[in-house]
Image (cartoon, rainbow, N blue to C red):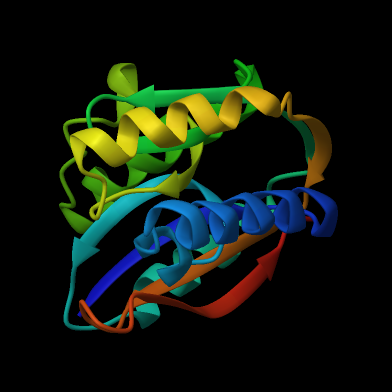
Amino acid sequence: MRIGFAILLDDKSHNVARKIELELCDKFGLCYGLKQSPHITIKAPFDTTNISPFVNYFELVAKKTKPFDIELEGFNYFEPNVIFLDVKENKKLKKMHDKIIKEMEEKFSIEPHEFEGDNIKFHVTLAVVDVTKSKFIKAKEYLKKYKPKLKFKAKTIGVFYYLGEDAGWAIVKRISLK
């Protein structure tokens, strides 16, 4: 099984992200982003045969972590095929992420992903996988009409479970920060 962990957005930020995802799907056929709930990844997906030890670990992380502010501002891109809401630099989020990837390696021998640690760029993916060069250019131009600026209190970690290419990712557990 393939699992991952992320900060879930508050209702307002979630609804803004989902609205934009739906528009990108409707106008440009960029629908793959809808196969997962809007989120900010804190541990990239990895394969395991047993989800329980990881859920237990993240429950402990949540108990030791107080809710903290996150700001989303504007769009950014991993060219040529990822469109996302940008997460403003955040020391608390980075510290949490660094601690998680260190402990995941120590406790479970889960190596950090190439885009974790010093290479992390926190973001909320809106379009990915089905993004062609022409769709990317059109969507980028279309998004210029928006100037998203959102702030919310990170309160929940989501445990994501991969259901396969057709179904995407499901949140199988929500864990509240204390």
Numbered-mark total: 0
Residue 148 to residue 163: above or below: above
Q: Quadrant of residue 177?
A: bottom right
Residue 124 left/right relative to 114: right
Residue 130 to residue 162: above or below: above
Question: Foreground residue, 9 or 135?
Answer: 135
Kindly identify the residue that appears in the image at 60 percent across and 22 percent down. Answer: 144
Residue 66 left/right relative to 101: right
Residue 95 appearing in the image: no
Residue 52 to residue 175: above or below: below
Kindly identify the residue that appears in the image at 38 percent across and 68 percent down. Answer: 54
Kindly identify the residue that appears in the image at 22 percent across and 28 percent down. Answer: 80
The percent position of residue 59, horizontal first and vertical second, equals 58, 66
Question: Foreground residue, 95 or 4?
Answer: 4
Kindly identify the residue that appears in the image at 20 percent across and 76 percent down. Answer: 165
The percent position of residue 67, horizontal first and vertical second, equals 80, 44
Residue 34 appearing in the image: yes
> In what quadrant of the picture does the N terminus appear?
bottom left
> In what quadrant of the picture does the C terminus appear?
bottom right
The percent position of residue 129, horizontal first and vertical second, equals 23, 53
Question: Foreground residue, 128 or 46?
Answer: 128
Q: Quadrant of residue 168?
A: bottom left
